Image: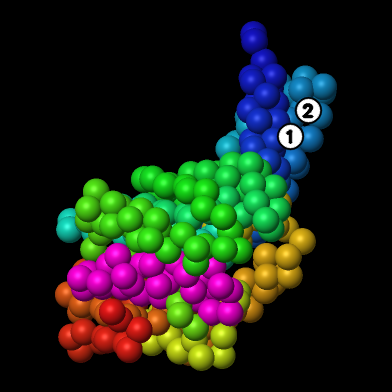
């Protein structure tokens, strides 16, 4: 009679390897990812050892049946939290298009990575435009590749990456306006996310100005919070990212070229999200300043997962609109 133990040992070894190596996937698709990962590693490691011992002892009869029953029960106990903690993926009945515009390869993940992941899982289409490869602040080629990995991890339908000179994007204002106008004509987004005017980084200010100029007739523009946001950043729209906080952390980690920067640290990301969550009466959130925000667009997203915690009555308008 052929023993079932070699097959079980191979299966359990594969599950253990996947649990050890699959950190990013767990963080993207599950709540409590670290707890789930530790549980998976513990259960599969113990089962692997137990099945190796059982195989070496050549268990037979009732002992083998009892051992195999215990193995199946333990694997079932692992499957249950995986089902319960999986972040749901839905298909929106009225899918919207979201365009996020950033200056540098890591700006989007840092500022609105949780929001975009949530939009993607809610069935909406998300595309990103990045204006530079950040070569003056790091390795331009590496940062471009990291941007692609981050986009793939979040689940974006597209990433348009340009190579205007960073630290001097203001000199390319007209070119950026043309790029954004082209994206608006091609993608026709329902909501635009971009940098705030309340930001100390000159490139972020330049992208903000170019976006407002190119999207001067667009009805819904939200400005996200970068690490370089100033004290004047005053958000009134918040997105609950409790199920996506760790996905955001992992997306930022993919930008390894910038990992030594203080604002890339997971504890810094979580601290900002906790602060904004407290403002929004949630655990963690990402914050936005509205330039203009049509309430019907806000409501279409809110109806999916109660994403937005403060809503305008009709339309927000700020003095920065042109």
Residue topped by disc 1: 48
Tell me the number on the disc at residue 245. none
Where is residue 180? Give x, y as percent. Answer: 34, 57
> In the image, what residue occupies the spot 63% across and 28% down?
11
Label 1 Cα neighbours within 10 Å, binned few <14 / some 14-19 / many ≥20: many
Name the residue nearer the viewer: 45 or 66.
45
**Label 1 to label 2, Cα distance in Å?**
6 Å
Residue 28, above or below 315: above
The quadrant the N terminus occupies is top right
- What colour scheme does the image use? rainbow
Mark 2 lies on a secondary structure that is helix
Name the residue nearer the viewer: 218 or 123.
218
> In the image, what residue occupies the spot 74% across and 41% down?
45
Mark 1 lies on a secondary structure that is helix
Q: Is residue 106 visible?
A: no
> In the image, what residue occupies the spot 22% across and 69% down?
218
Q: Is residue 217 left or right of residue 40?
A: left
Residue topped by disc 2: 52
Judge whether residue 57 is colored magenta: no
Q: Is residue 295 left or right of residue 24?
A: left
Where is residue 106? Give x, y as percent. Answer: 57, 58
Residue 309, above or below 248: below
Judge whether residue 217 is colored magenta: yes
Where is residue 121? Give x, y as percent. Answer: 37, 55
Tell whether label 2 touches label 1 (CB within 8 Å): yes
Residue 101, above or below 135: below
Where is residue 199? Give x, y as percent. Answer: 53, 79
> In the image, what residue occupies the spot 56% across and 90% down?
231
**Within the image, what quadrant is residue 67 found in?**
top right
Q: Is residue 226 visible?
A: yes
Where are the magenta residues, as a range?
A: 199-226
Label 2 Cα neighbours within 10 Å, binned few <14 / some 14-19 / many ≥20: some
């Amino acid at each position: 009679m052929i023993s079932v133990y070699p097959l079980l040992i191979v299966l359990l070894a594969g599950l253990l390897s996947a649990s050890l190596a699959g950190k990013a996937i767990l963080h993207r698709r599950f709540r409590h990812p670290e707890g789930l990962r530790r549980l998976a590693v513990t259960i599969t490691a113990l089962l692997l050892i137990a099945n190796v011992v059982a195989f070496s002892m050549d268990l037979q009869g009732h002992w083998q049946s009892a051992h195999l029953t215990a193995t199946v029960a333990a694997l079932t106990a692992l499957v249950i939290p995986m089902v319960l903690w999986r972040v749901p993926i839905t298909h929106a009945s009225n899918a919207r298009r979201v365009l996020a515009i950033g200056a540098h390869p890591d700006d989007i993940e840092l500022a609105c990575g949780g929001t975009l992941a949530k939009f993607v899982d809610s069935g909406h289409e998300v595309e990103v435009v990045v204006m530079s490869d950040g070569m003056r602040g790091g390795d331009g080629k590496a940062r471009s590749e990291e941007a692609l990995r981050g986009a793939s991890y979040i689940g974006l339908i597209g990433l348009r990456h340009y190579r205007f000179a960073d630290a001097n994007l203001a000199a390319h204002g007209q070119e950026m306006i043309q790029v954004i106008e082209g994206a608006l004509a091609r993608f026709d987004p329902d909501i635009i996310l971009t940098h705030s005017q309340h930001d100390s980084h000159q490139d972020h200010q330049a992208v903000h100005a170019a976006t407002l100029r190119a999207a001067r007739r667009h009805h819904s523009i939200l400005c996200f919070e970068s690490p370089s946001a100033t004290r004047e950043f005053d958000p009134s729209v918040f997105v609950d990212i409790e199920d996506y906080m760790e996905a955001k952390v992992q997306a930022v980690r993919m930008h390894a070229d910038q990992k030594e920067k203080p604002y890339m640290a997971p504890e810094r990301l979580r601290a900002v999200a906790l602060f904004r969550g407290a403002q929004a009466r949630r655990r963690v959130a990402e914050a936005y300043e509205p330039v203009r925000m049509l309430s019907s667009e806000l409501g279409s997203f809110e109806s999916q997962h109660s994403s937005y915690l403060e809503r305008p009555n009709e339309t927000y308008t700020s003095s920065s609109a042109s």
